[in-house]
Image (cartoon, grey):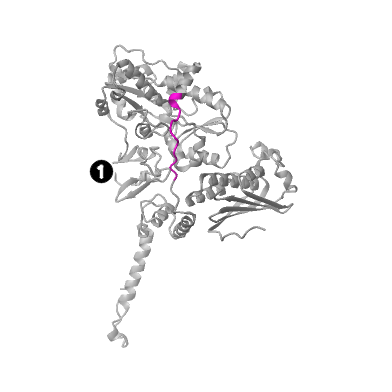
Amino acid sequence: MSIYYHSIEVDTDQCTGCMSCMRACPTEAIRVREGKALILGDRCIDCGDCIRVCPARAVRSMTGSFEDLSRFKYTIAIPSPPLYAQYGISITPNQILNGLKGLGFNEAYDIGKACEVYSAVIREHLHNYSDNKPYISTVCLAVVRLIQINFPELMGNLLSMEAPSAIAGAYKTARARVLGISPQDIGTIFITPCPAKMIAVNHPIFKSDPTLDGAIAISDIYGVLFTAIRKISKPEPLHDSGGLGVATGIPGACITSLEIENAIAVDGVHNVIKILEDVERGKITNVNYLELWACPGGCVGGPLAVDNPYLARIKAMKLMQQLGTSLNIAPAKVEQMRAHLSCDVELSTHPIQPLGRDARDAIKKMKERDAMLSTLPRINCGACGAPTCKAFAEDVIQGQSEITDCIFKLKEATMEAIRRGLDLAQKPPLSIRKRGAWKGATSDM
Amino acid sequence: MQEKQAEPLLEQDFMVQGGDFIHAGEVSSSIKAILKEIGMSHEVIRRAAIATYEAEMNVVCYARRAAFHLAITPERLTVVAQDEGQGIPDIEQAMKEGFSTSTREIKEMGFGAGMGLPNIKKNTDELSVSSVPGEGTRVEMIIYAQK
């Protein structure tokens, strides 16, 4: 299997092995080994729930820093729409774009327009096709990952389109031509609330080439950007998109613009898992479109966002109202955008490996695991370093753990050893055994 | 005559309660999880999940309770649902798309569209339905592991 890129890492110097992340992980992708959290790459979906719960701040997004800017001759900041909702309502998207320039980016590009055109592309697709209903949005990369790993049979339901930020690739090419420099010298840096965006930088799913050159967390830029915004003296007009461009990332905000019946938005990874299970068993029959978001509250609830997601949501919705949500986009523009967004690779799945090399072997291992599970306490205490007794039993069957890594099994084994020791201690030596004169150690010693 | 089948590698039993809409779908989920762990193809998993779910819904909507039995051989998986309930007087009719005897209440809940058995048929390789009116229905669903 190809190298499977991840955008979350554990700083083992900081990690205290407290297991908060292991318990929070929705896909059971974390174990604790030698006192440190270990992310299992083949199960992690990059949702960032571990980042949210880590009290030691040891789980980190692999997003970049300002030093990335020096790698390029010319840099373009591309704020994700949730950035517009991170400050007070009096700070406008245009001020934020100007603030980014003030921070040292050569340009700040508003992808709001791209978000609007993206809605138009989806609208057209949903009106023209109905073979793989319900279609599933691909804007949330953690959801795409979840489907690749846990719901591979639903890959066909995914819209085969990259998120609006994919427009950055095309924009870079156009700018290179105007500026007379090589596209390699231009860096497009996404300002993100989400670690999973690093997938688009390092290991794109829908495109053969990355569409972004880097990403910086909103949380890493929040303070300095605020200062930069306050220093703006002569703002340039940089923001020209409508409301949808601001509210993309708020669950359901863009659905009305799709003019399609029975489209639903679901947020929070556990809710998303539930609805995907319903799709899988054929329960969701009348729904045309599913907009799914791993984070509660959508992108404004991202692990790298700063403001309270509910406050940010209100601000984004207010901005959307002010800016209007009309989607009058020329058909030629929609056509052009579709070309930029459309998937140019075969989508791959990364299903969790079966328990054995074939059905027979897998069933044998499953039975061993279930037999072992029935002897475990099944209280999911986590002391063994696995999130559940079932996961632990599987780790043992696969040779990843030893049975005495379970503290209860260790107690049993210790008890057994003590009993054996007592029996031995009570046994007199052969030379005097018959006479019975020697009483030996007794259990009430 | 049906050829003799190999001893199942795995057998498991599940119970479904009539009227229990909250837990409807759990058998389908459990079977899906097992098939994933075994490494069955996505297509087999998808079909099994749909067929079992429809069978579960039939029990929840129309029967008192049912025992589901799963048997897996390397070649096929078989799910037999034996319920206690009103039974089906005319199976041929029940196999037709859109035919339904469901009550208004069940239709209002979004079920009972008369797609249950036809949908099971669509997603299985062999299906046999037998019923004793007033006693219950037995639905045997077979899906081939490889086609």
Q: Which residues are magenta?
A: A339-351
Residue with the most extreme top position = A234
From the top left corner, tell me how far across and down residue A18 is, in percent. Answer: 33, 46
Q: Is residue A346 magenta?
A: yes
In depth, the one of B85 and A313 nearer the eye is B85
Q: Quadrant of the N terminus of chain A?
A: top left
Looking at numbered disc 1 in the image, what kind of residue is underneath it? Asp
Q: Is residue A90 visible in the rendered structure shown here? A: no
Q: Residue at x 53, y 50 (%)?
A: B30
Which chain is disc 1 placed on? Answer: A
From the top left corner, tell me how far across and down residue A413 is, in percent. Answer: 36, 64
Q: Quadrant of residue A300?
A: top left
Provide the major secondary structure of the magenta segment: loop
From the top left corner, tell me how far across and down residue A174 is, in percent. Answer: 36, 19
Q: Is residue A402 visible in the rendered structure shown here? A: yes
Residue with the most extreme bottom position = A435
Q: Which residue is mark 1?
A: A13
Q: Quadrant of residue A429?
A: bottom left
The secondary element bearing badge 1 is classed as loop
In depth, the one of A156 and B134 nearer the eye is A156
From the top left corner, tell me how far across and down residue A382 is, in percent. Answer: 38, 51
Label 1 environment density (alpha carbons within 10 Å; few <14, some 14–19, many ≥20):
few
In depth, the one of A127 and A444 nearer the eye is A127
From the viewer's perspective, is residue A71 above or below residue A330? below
Q: Is residue A322 magenta?
A: no
